[in-house]
Amino acid sequence: MTDALTKMLSERDWVMADGATGTNLFNMGLSSGDAPELWNADEPQNIKKLYSLAVDAGSDLFLTNTFGGNASRLKLHNAESRVRELNRLGAALGREVADASGRTVIVAGSVGPTGEIMAPMGSLTHELAVEMFHEQAEGLKEGGADVLWLETISAPEEYKAAAEAFALAGMPWCGTMSFDTAGRTMMGVTSASMVDMVEALPNPPIAFGANCGVGASDLMRTVLGFIASGTERPVIAKGNAGIPKYVDGHIHYDGTPELMGAYACLARDAGARIIGGCCGTMPEHLKAMRAALESTPKGPRPTLEDIAVKLGGFSSASDGTGDQSDAPARSRRNSRRRT
Amino acid sequence: MSEEDDIILSELDDEELVQQMMDDLYDGLKEEIEEGVNILLERGWTPYDVLTKALVAGMTIVGHDFRDGILFVPEVLLAANAMKGGMAILKPLLAETGAPRMGKMVIGTVKGDIHDIGKNLVSMMMEGAGFEVVDLGINNAVEAYLEALDSEKPDILGMSALLTTTMPYMKVVIDTLKEKGIRDDYVVLVGGAPLNEEFGRAIGADAYCRDAAVAVETAKDFMSRRHNQMNG
């Protein structure tokens, strides 16, 4: 049987995803430092509200409130024994909201990073990472998620471990990385090297792409990098609503709904198939994005200059792809191997 | 490269050996660094000279290439690990010989924030640069910072936050230091993905550090200014 997301992608030019989770939950009274996932059990009405905000604003797909729902993250709240339960509940609440919407809405089971550095640099082994992701995947599957959704990943090792876990759970999946360091992920992955990694997986995702990062402009540059590789696989764009600014004791993302509308159309014109927001993307942004996508005819693929004009400049001169990749800055003595 | 003759560290003269150690640090070769440190000590180098002229100098190159987007976190972690191997040998000797200190930093993520990869990276790079680092871990309330400042007497206070919801807490800490009249006793450095220079200024920090390499440079900068003030 074809999964719901693959079916939707075959019927539409673009699919609109959701926006921020944390930003919305904090508005509902979640204190910073608390695990949002606990609300799947303690404040289910707020979580349903969160999902409804995205659905009512026109999202065809939303992510469950399970981003930090792996054992490694929940351990920081002494809730590592509740991984399966909290993920099941998070997905089940999503299922309820999606099924009551009167149209097809995809429930995507969010899976975020473990927060650990993987071996050999760090202490998290591949086996343990697979086990943690698998446990979370089974909970999301039980709760009725249509698809699993890996996001904000920096390390290719972690992306691969999650892919392996999702195969164990027998679930279709999508996976995005966060390109926040001079156009690369924190661990140095470029858009081009992510494409290579994704295509080499034994169970590649339905769609892959970028989320979060620095701002809408940088994210668009990454999307262009994916497309330039010639990939046939649907590309996901989930950018932040601008850059966070400090205003009167509060943090405010400077991206307006109009800017996010322009970003959504640029993402589509660049070739992204699943388009949404990330941090700071509120329901009013989503509405503007949906309206812009529906009312603006598809245009030619934007250039970097078009993006800079419409969304603002980039955070770094290069994104590490093409001619600029791995340019040696100093002459190195020969490395040596010692026996 | 594989055809190349093995290099015997003990056969190199001092200058070549230091060059080689810089390369080995860059490549994250821990055992080679440990061997190099021991050879220099045997040749009568002071522990302080080994630290500053070989290790810190080597890590500075790593830091610059990290800052410039040539090296990324995995390579830096390997280099820091090699550095740590050398430091383990030097640390007791440095204490014995009463060598001058680079400076001391207390660091932790602020209350509500449990994301610590960035903070850990700064700790490692600061140690790599020869600083003494007291890591308070995650989720620190203002009381925890105050207590550590009191007991550790550091030169620098570092605060880290990954969330836009937790970064305003940095201002709470700085405001408390001001109230207590001890703000100027410390260099306050802040960092974290959603921060920027404007934010650092707005909350009254001495500097915002974009990444771990910048944190090290900024810390060195402030320490040398401090020393100049004291001497002058």
Image (cartoon, coloured by chain):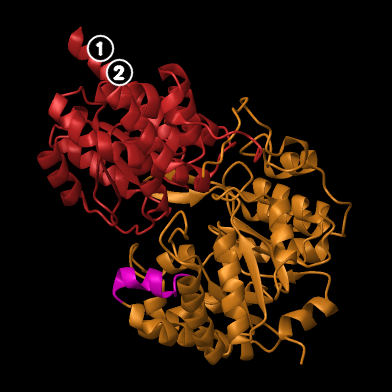
Q: Nearer the viewer, residue B86 or A250?
A: B86
The chain letter of the orange chain reads: A
In depth, the one of B189 and A285 nearer the eye is B189
Q: Can residue A72 be spotted in the picture?
A: yes
Taking the image as shown, residue A150 lies to the left or right of residue A30, namely: right
Chain identifier of the residue bearing label 2 in the image: B
Pointers 1 and 2 in contact (C-beta within 8 Å): yes
Vertical side of B203 occupied by A329: above or below: above
Q: Quadrant of the N terminus of chain A?
A: bottom right
The residue furthest top is B232
Q: Is residue A283 left or right of residue B90?
A: right
Q: Chain of mark 1?
A: B
Question: Looking at the rendered structure, which numbered label has been put on residue B224?
Answer: 2
* Residue at the disc numbered 1: B228
Q: Give coordinates of residue A226: x percent, y percent.
A: 76, 55
Q: Which color has been applied to chain B in this rendered view? A: red
Q: Position of residue A234 (x, y in %)?
A: 78, 67
Q: Amino acid at mark 1?
A: Asn
On screen, residue A27 above or below A5: above
Residue A4 image offset from top left, x and y in percent: 72, 85
| Region in magenta | A67-78
When asked about the image quadrant of residue B3, the answer is: top right
Residue sticking out furthest to the left = B151
Name the side, left or right, on which B49 lies relative to A41: left
**Please, what secondary structure does the residue beneath circle 1 have?**
helix
Q: Residue at x 64, y 68 (%)?
A: A175
